[in-house]
Image (cartoon, rainbow, N blue to C red):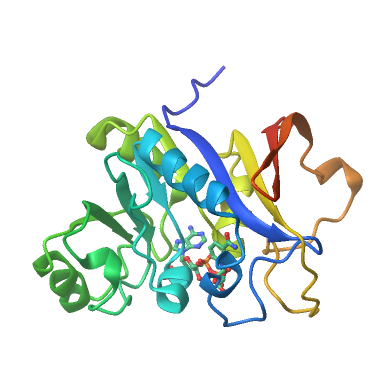
Amino acid sequence: MAEAMPRPHVLMMSEITVDGKLTLKRGASSKILMKYMAHETELLLHKTRAELDAIMVGSNTIKIDNSFLTVRYVQGKSPLRVIPNSNADIPLDSNVLGPDAPTVIAVSEAAPADRVEAIRKKGVQVVVTGRDRVDLPLLMKTLYEKFGVRKLMIEGGPTLNWHMLHYRLVDEIRLIHLPFIVGGADTPSLVGGMHIETEDEMIRLELARHYMCGSNLVTEYRVLYR
Ligand SMILES: NC(=O)c1ccc[n+]([C@@H]2O[C@H](COP(=O)([O-])OP(=O)(O)OC[C@H]3O[C@@H](n4cnc5c(N)ncnc54)[C@H](OP(=O)(O)O)[C@@H]3O)[C@@H](O)[C@H]2O)c1
């Protein structure tokens, strides 16, 4: 039997409304919803970041939210920030390209050389993997072997979440439930991507824990696959 590629343990963590949405409407920053998180839950999120070696979000979240992805509300070291961005087109003034924490931008071989160079000049590391789209399994292996990442958290968005689950790269899911309904058929939900055809393709989870954190319910699941 082929040996599994070494990779970090991966936790997917997200705030989510009662109707499963991650933001107010397509194109809106999730920072608007995050304002309604209990302070205790903000602390939980930042404590979790500080416990892990790396944090990854998709390039579209960077373009919309301009996240810092740093540890601010508790004592602790900010993790390595990892952004898959196949075409190397994130804005050069993005907060993740700033000096607050180390950053890896993962690009594909098709990314224009001048854009890659401009990102490198910001003082961040660039990993090239995949022909025209970042190869996520290979990126996980590189993070494990070259950057010593043993525990990684992904904080969305739905497109990256779907691809990580599709490649069976997620081990745990932790959800911060916000007591709101926002609606909208095209409002981003926890997992985007393609629908499945049959129930055999459903990804099975096992509830590991649930608890209140301030006024927010938090649920934790193990991802079982099959
Ligand atoms: N509530 C929350 O916890 C939370 C957290 C995060 C985000 N959000 C919200 O989610 C929304 C953005 O989500 P989104 O689904 O549009 O984008 P996303 O998942 O943040 O980013 C997707 C992008 O990542 C890049 N990428 C590179 N390699 C990839 C690969 N192998 N597989 C998948 N993606 C890859 C792709 O763009 P290129 O390769 O072309 O660069 C892709 O379009 C925003 O509204 C944001 O506010 C909410």
Question: Which quarter of the figure has residue 54?
Answer: top left
Between 32 and 53, the one lying in front of the other is 32
Direction top: furthest residue: 1
Left or right: 108 as drawn, with respect to 26:
left
- Residue 52 visible, this orientation: no
Residue placed at 81% from the left, 45% from the top? 201
Residue 102 spot, x, y in % from top left: 21, 51
Direction right: furthest residue: 199
121 w.r.t. 191: above or below: below
- Residue 160 visible, this orientation: yes
Between 144 and 128, the one lying in front of the other is 144
Left or right: 107 as drawn, with respect to 205:
left
Residue placed at 51% from the left, 37% from the top? 10
Residue placed at 70% from the left, 34% from the top? 221
Quadrant assignment for the C terminus: top right
How many numbered marks appear?
0
Residue 169 spot, x, y in % from top left: 55, 39
72 w.r.t. 170: above or below: below
Quadrant assignment for the N terminus: top right
Residue 21 spot, x, y in % from top left: 72, 66
65 w.r.t. 131: above or below: below
Question: Which quarter of the figure has residue 28?
Answer: bottom right
Residue 106 spot, x, y in % from top left: 32, 57
Residue placed at 40% from the left, 40% from the top? 140
